[in-house]
Amino acid sequence: MAIDERLLSRIRKEFPAAARDATGRKRAFLDNGAGTLVCRRAAQAEARARIDWSANTGNVFPESKGAEATILAGRQAVADLLNAEGPHAIVSGESATSLLFHLSYALGRVFTDGGSVVMTAYEHHANVAPWTELLRAGKVREVRYAEFDPTTFELDLGKLARAVDGQTKVVAVAAASNFLGTCTDLREVGKIAHDAGALFVVDAVHDVCHRSTDVRAIGADALVFSGYKFFSRHGSFLYLRPDLLASLTPYKVEPSPNVGPERWEWGTRDQALFAAIAGAVDHVACLAAPAGQEAPRSGAARRAALGKAMEAIEAYEAALSRTVLEGDGRWPGLRHIPGLTLYGPPGIPAAGRDPTFSFRLAGREDTDVARVLYSKYGLAVGAEDYFSRVPALFGLKTALRATFVHYNTPDDASGLLRALHKLARKDR
């Protein structure tokens, strides 16, 4: 399958806010890295769950049983999205940050002989602080960062391999940099980690909406992502290898369950969170089905539909990336805009590239540029540090960032190039 004009039209109907903002103004939403728009299926499923299944679990009446079924169906949807062993391997939480802290605290209870944690230099701080906390607490002796090439912006796998040794406890990496767009060769990093006897933890928050994610194929011991970065609402999910989920001892209140994902979850679950993520997963799976037909709702058939749809999304977004980087025939790409500095791969490396473009215009304040891009050109982009380690490595406090997803159009890409060329010429 491929995302052609007809399928793109179907997709954009699922995202009413993709074409116009809440005031009715026509625009292109390119701040997807900070949070994607919510698809109609997710919003409708959440609303139904809030109204119909508003009771707590564990009781005999329909609202309670409906909440239980909704939570289980949401776990199953996430398991299908990630090709996990089943719903019993999926833990929910407030945020990716909280889940990674939860995991690091549990690991800290069994780390007694020092060792190291290895990460990439392009991590989001959500995947830094949980591990540096172990260093502060004396549970590990060292945190190491594998460098990326400052010209190609690709991870140096050789340096990462040399940073990992027999004393390494955890290798924790981003599936993709939320600042550079650089993708990590997860299979190779997972092999490096396991060959050294270390656990392999993946922060897939920025990448999960762009590429197919298979926790078993990459050998992930743990993987985290957030619903609001995958066309759903706030709230996050942790895949934890089932034997680890059972053997590690998380911090918990005494009466909470001693088995299953509930053992890792604090407080009452929000059934609407699970309904919403199931709706977002169904949206993606339905892209592989003919118009008007529903996709399979579980099992191998849904996993196959998700894989097919995500392959099409990756190919479509790669085409958008080439337009942004190389130009559209009329407007040259980002690399050719006078005074613009691009932070990220100038092409699409073998490991892949998410459609994330961070840049600065010489002599211009990032917030001012972002304001003009929206007020004059209807382009929503970010202007901040994105909680990434990368800006500080280049001496930056902020940068502009445009991030595309599958509901964006070629016209959105061309519109960004046109606006930046005009701003670079001060033609405002």
Image (tube, rainbow, N blue to C red):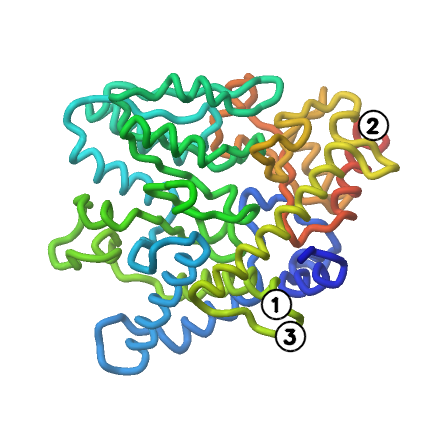
Look at the numbered disc 3 and give the secondary structure of its residue.
loop
Is 74 drawn above or below residue 379 in the view shown?
below
Residue 426, label in figure: 2
Which of the two discs, 1 and 2, labels the residue nearer the N terminus?
A: 1
x%, y% of residue 308? 58, 56
Q: In the picture provided, is 162 more to the left or to the right than 368?
A: left
Identity of the amino acid at label 1? Ala
Residue 335: name its quadrant: top right
Is the Cβ of the residue at disc 1 closer than 8 Å to that at disc 3?
Answer: no
Is the Cβ of the residue at disc 1 closer than 8 Å to that at disc 2?
Answer: no
Is 349 drawn above or below residue 9 in the view shown?
above
Asked if one can make out residue 22 in the rendered structure from this viewpoint, the answer is yes
Q: Quadrant of the C terminus?
A: top right
Q: Of residues 1 and 325, which is closer to you in this image?
A: 1
The residue at 61%/67% (across/down) is 289
Residue 150: name its quadrant: top right
Residue matched to label 3: 292
Residue matched to label 1: 289
Q: In the picture provided, is 397 more to the left or to the right than 76?
A: right
The residue at 12%/59% (across/down) is 255
